[in-house]
Amino acid sequence: MTPGKLYLVATPIGNLEDITLRALRALRRADIIACEDTRTTSVLLRRYNIKKSLVSYHAHNERERSENLAGKLLEGKTIALVSDAGTPGISDPGYTILKLALENNIEIDVLPGANAILPALLLSGLPPYPFLFHGFPPEKEGQRRELFTQLSQLPCTLCFYISPHKGVKHLNDMLEIFGDRNASLVREISKIYQEATLTTLSAIRDRLKEGVKGELVLVVSGCDKDSKDSAAADWKLFIPEMLKDGLSVRDITEKILQEVKGANKNEIKEAVLAEKAKLC
């Protein structure tokens, strides 16, 4: 039996007119449409008079449903996978079924279409390339802070999805690790209340405290290499004086970490030890 075909179909992120002709054709050809929320997808299908069998495919059933859908594909069925908005597999379920299809040599077609990141990046007013998209920051504080520390040294523009309910604590971590960089909060892309404001991380944090609704993309300027080099040079100048004052390697390292945003603990410790060796 000849296997079927898997379509990954990008769907509108706000305006239902942001659907491509190829996407509509794929949805009409499909034997089954797998979607995050059947109610949300039904609105799109009714708008374009498409009547198909729908099955739920979301974060809580992705593994089990992927295996079932892979079986349907091997039986010759054509399946279209969509998320509630945007491209499935990008901060949405989809990668598991994609991987299974590749492993089973099933034909795949990923259709381009609406997405939140590229419009947000351009609307932000920050340099659009190079850029790094991370998706949602980790929920666990330790993992989140470790990620931000790693990203703090990158010169490229950084893009994140932000939850209105968790954004304040995420911005607090960014401010502590990145410093108060230029940033843009882009919300409700492609909808009637679309908005993009180029400001600073602290101003965005304060606005989130007041309450912001809608889908949010946070775009943050990259590390300024000149500023980074200058900051590094500054804290190294104070090491000899602190050693003469009798501070320990640990005390000096902790003091610099507290005062220099984005400083690397191992780099500081090595610099202190190297300076201490000179004084011996």
Image (cartoon, helix red, strand yellow):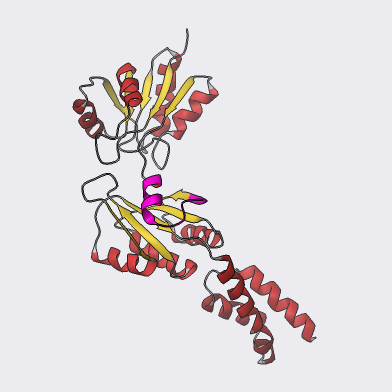
From which residue to which does the magenta span run?
Answer: 118-132
Give the image location of residue 245, x and y in percent. 65, 92
Front position in the image: 217 or 169: 217
Front position in the image: 195 or 215: 195
> Can you see residue 24?
yes
Give the image location of residue 253, x and y in percent. 61, 77
Is the residue 198 above or below the residue 57 in the image? below
Question: At 45% across and 15% down in the image, what residue appears?
Answer: 74
Question: At 24% across and 45% down in the image, what residue appears?
Answer: 191
Question: At 46% across and 13% down in the image, what residue appears?
Answer: 3
- Is 87 magenta? The answer is no
- Is 128 magenta? The answer is yes
Is the residue 152 above or below the residue 246 in the image? above
Front position in the image: 36 or 183: 183
Give the image location of residue 92, x and y in percent. 38, 39
Give the image location of residue 176, x and y in percent. 46, 70
> Can you see residue 250?
no
Q: Quadrant of residue 257?
A: bottom right
View extreme (top): residue: 1
View extreme (bottom): residue: 245
Q: How many marks?
A: 0
Question: At 38% across and 17% down in the image, what residue appears?
Answer: 78
Side (left or right) of 252 relative to 171: right
Quadrant the C terminus occupies: bottom right
Is the residue 53 above or below the residue 92 in the image? above
